[in-house]
């Protein structure tokens, strides 16, 4: 050991000399190392998250009732002329007259949702990196899809302007094409000769990527830009938009006479029409309080008691902004809110969270239908509905049923299949207390 070095210093220097000699820069430059890509493969947890909007706000809001023993109901639409009047001391009694009754009916509709997995995928799903019980995961997803389908059906738009057409197709904006369902019967309004053609065109396919709707039946000349395709009858549940309509509604630059249930005439101001069907000929305008107030007033004048304002998200925020000036604050205080593992700075609560307007609950639903511009085929904002839900119900003939099939011979394949179906219909017992505002800006 060199003179002047302690034992510890001598050993440390020896280690440095050895590393420099045997593991120096030249040695390190010649080496290769295992990296993450050599030893690691990404795996995914078994939980599957839905990147979809599964909210069913309006479906949750509608009262559900048993179907009952009949398919129809009666509406009393006239008191009878002169049957009630003052009578003098010895005067004659009023002339007896009869009330007028209208028969409305609708047979049950059947939304259905199917799903299936292969037997092999069911087995492999339990291996490392799989999603577990593949069939169960698909079944749970289909349950959400089934409720979403019902929500979309009862909020489907009833009339839209077409941008093009061919012998067996018409084209609408892609984002609203899903409002047409396979099996729906559509009528055509020809803009050139301002004529409603009542030839039944039955929808056989809907392309939600291109907006092309295919149908069987013979159109009166191909659909053209500016024509209107409107619902004559639904294959699925009748929608609120169908209910709140009237004959020759000004949809875009065209017109629509949407039927519902077994009704064939929906004269404005009569029992079969909505209280206030407010279109603007396809010209967008901003939502205003006066538009909503007019719906409320008309409904009340017709004997209704509106108890729901239904909006899309865009109109919900418009209404909030309209009412912001009426917000009142009592006192001043600060507080903070937890977000995950952290909290906001102490501050005050700002922004108006709208719950009611004039005592009427306000709900927003992403499935509320939008209108279409008459000139550019562009999508306008969502509609707004002022409804008396006392006369609206979802009649259930058979609650949602689940059927499972594992018969490989019947399927002629090693597959597991499932089916969800519901039998029912959306009913309205008073049309002219329901209102709609369309052609709104976003």
Image (tube, rainbow, N blue to C red):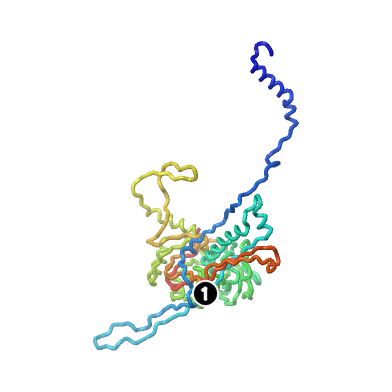
Q: Is residue 5 above or below residue 22?
A: above
Q: Is residue 383 above or below residue 334?
A: below
Residue 348 appears in view: yes
In this rendering, would 215 be left or right of 304? right
Residue 378 appears in view: no
- Residue 314 drawn at (x, y percent): 49, 57
Q: Is residue 170 above or below residue 318?
A: below
| Residue 125 position by quadrant | bottom right
- Residue 362 drawn at (x, y percent): 43, 60
Q: Secondary structure at mark 1?
A: loop
Q: Given the current orientation, which residue lies at the most extreme top position?
A: 3
In this rendering, would 221 be left or right of 245? right
- Residue 252 drawn at (x, y percent): 53, 67
Query: Dot 1: few (<14), some (14–19), or many (≥20) neighbours within 10 Å?
Result: many
- Residue 215 drawn at (x, y percent): 63, 71
Q: Quadrant of the N terminus?
A: top right
Which residue is found at the position 72% from the left and 26% from the top?
Answer: 23
Number of on-image labels:
1
Q: Nearer the viewer, residue 80 or 48?
A: 48
Q: Nearer the viewer, residue 389 or 120?
A: 120
The residue wearing badge 1 is 259
Which residue is found at the position 65% from the left and 71% from the top?
Answer: 168
Q: Nearer the viewer, residue 173 or 1?
A: 1
Which residue is found at the position 48% from the left and 42% from the top?
Answer: 342
């Amino acid at each position: 050991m060199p003179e002047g070095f302690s034992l510890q210093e001598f050993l440390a220097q020896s280690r440095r000399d050895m590393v420099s000699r045997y593991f120096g820069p030249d040695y390190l430059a010649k080496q290769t190392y295992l990296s993450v890509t050599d030893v690691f493969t990404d795996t995914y947890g078994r939980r599957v998250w839905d990147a979809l909007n599964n909210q069913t706000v309006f479906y949750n809001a509608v009262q559900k009732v048993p179907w009952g023993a009949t398919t129809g109901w009666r509406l009393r639409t006239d008191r009878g002329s002169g049957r009630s009047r003052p009578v003098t001391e010895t005067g004659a009694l009023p002339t007896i007259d009869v009330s007028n009754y209208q028969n409305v009916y609708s047979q049950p509709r059947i939304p259905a949702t199917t799903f299936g997995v292969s037997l092999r995928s069911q087995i492999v799903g339990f291996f490392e990196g799989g999603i577990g019980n593949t069939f169960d995961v698909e079944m749970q997803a289909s349950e959400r899809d089934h409720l979403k389908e019902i929500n979309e059906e009862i909020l489907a738009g009833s009339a839209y302007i077409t941008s093009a057409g061919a012998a067996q197709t018409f084209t609408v904006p892609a984002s609203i094409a899903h409002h047409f369902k396979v099996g729906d019967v559509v009528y055509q309004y020809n803009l050139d000769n301002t004529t409603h053609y009542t030839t039944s065109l039955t929808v056989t396919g809907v392309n939600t990527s291109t907006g092309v709707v295919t149908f069987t039946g013979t159109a009166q000349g191909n659909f053209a830009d500016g024509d209107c395709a409107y619902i004559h009858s639904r294959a699925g549940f009748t929608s609120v938009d169908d209910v709140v309509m009237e004959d020759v509604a000004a949809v875009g630059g065209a017109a629509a006479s949407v039927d519902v249930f077994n009704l064939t005439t929906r004269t404005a101001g009569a029992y079969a029409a909505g209280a206030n069907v407010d279109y603007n000929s396809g010209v967008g305008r901003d939502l205003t309080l006066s538009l909503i107030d007019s719906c409320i007033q008309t409904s009340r004048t017709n004997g209704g008691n509106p108890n729901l304002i239904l909006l899309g998200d865009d109109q919900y925020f418009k209404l909030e902004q309209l009412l912001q000036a009426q917000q009142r604050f009592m006192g001043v205080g600060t507080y903070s809110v937890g977000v995950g593992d952290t909290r906001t700075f102490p501050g005050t609560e700002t922004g108006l969270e709208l719950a009611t307007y004039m005592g009427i609950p306000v709900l927003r639903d992403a499935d509320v239908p939008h209108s279409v511009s008459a000139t550019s085929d562009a999508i306008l904002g969502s509609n707004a509905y002022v409804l008396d839900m006392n006369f609206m119900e979802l009649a259930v003939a058979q609650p949602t049923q689940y059927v499972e099939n594992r018969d490989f011979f019947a399927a002629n394949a090693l597959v597991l299949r499932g089916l969800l179906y519901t039998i029912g219909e959306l009913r309205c017992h008073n049309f002219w207390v329901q209102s709609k505002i369309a052609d709104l800006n976003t």
